[in-house]
Image (cartoon, helix red, strand yellow):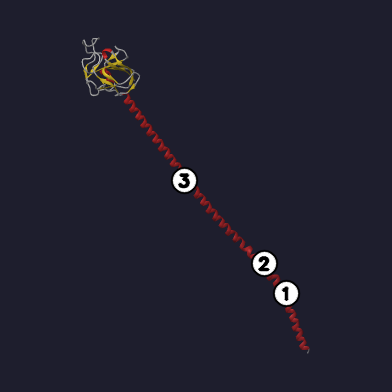
Amino acid sequence: MAFTRATGKHRARNRRIRRGVSIAGVATLTAGGAIGTLASPALAADTDAPSARLTGLAQAIAIDHSLAGAIDDQAEAQRAAAERAAAMARAERMAEARAKEVRAAEERAARAAERKRLNAFRLPVAGSYVTTGYRSGGSLWSSGSHSGVDFRAASGTPVVAVGAGTVVEAGWAGSYGYNVVLRMNDGTYTQYGHLSSIGVSAGRSVTAGLRIGLSGATGNATGPHLHFEARTGPDYGSDIDPVAYLRTHGVNV
């Protein structure tokens, strides 16, 4: 009986001890394990946080570098496009300037050609030649000598202005018959006599080669021809050598 009880006490005591141990173990587990369990995620979080932050920073740096590169590429493309546009604009300005220079040169050449044409001299009767020379003597002339030259011309042959000028006289002139007197642009005068008809009037501007009348034998003439004079003034007596005058102005007489 005593053994049984003793044994029972021993067992009871052991159970209490075990319960105490269990409770202590639970307490320890609760104090250690639970805390450890609760603490472990926090510790894990604390342990992993720097890695996460570093990963995010690396990604941000990579994105920043990529964005900066894209911006640089865009800026470079814009700069290149601006340079191309500027080069094209310069080329267009240069081409326009060259075109203006060409047009100006062409206009100058055209004006020079026109001045040359206007200032050019020619024979009063195309393809003709002198039949009576300057200062030829004889009773045919009241002054005793020829004040001009005679060009061969059948009646009705066109007579033209030898150069550019203005008509100062157009009509009947006694022994000259129907005549035209021009004041040339260089200040000299030319006279065309014995015309059968007149095609201009006083005050009209003429150019070299413009028809001013038709040849004939009006006035003091022995037959159809053109009497041509060159003068330093508008009046009779200011005559100069017509052949020398025409040659001075480049006409082959």
**Neighbour tally class for label 3: few under 14, some 14-19, many 20 plus, Cα within 10 Å:** few
User: Residue, x 43% and y 42% (percent of image)?
Assistant: 88
Q: CA distance from mark 3 to mark 1?
A: 82 Å
Residue plotted at (38% across, 33% down): 103
Which comes sooner in the sequence, label 3 or label 1?
A: 1
Q: Quadrant of residue 132?
A: top left
Residue 164: image location, x then y, percent: 32, 22
Mark 1 residue type: Ala
Label at residue 57: none
CA neighbours of label 1 inside 10 A, class few (<14), some (14 to 19), many (20+): some
Q: Earlier in the sequence, mark 1 or mark 2?
A: 1
Work out whether residue 220 or residue 239 is closer to the camera in this orientation and state it. Answer: 220
Residue bearing the label numbered 3: 81
Q: Position of residue 11 (x, y in %)?
A: 74, 83
Residue ranking furthest to the bottom = 1
Q: Position of residue 21 (x, y in %)?
A: 72, 77
Rendered-image quadrant of the N terminus: bottom right
Q: Which mark is residue 24?
A: 1
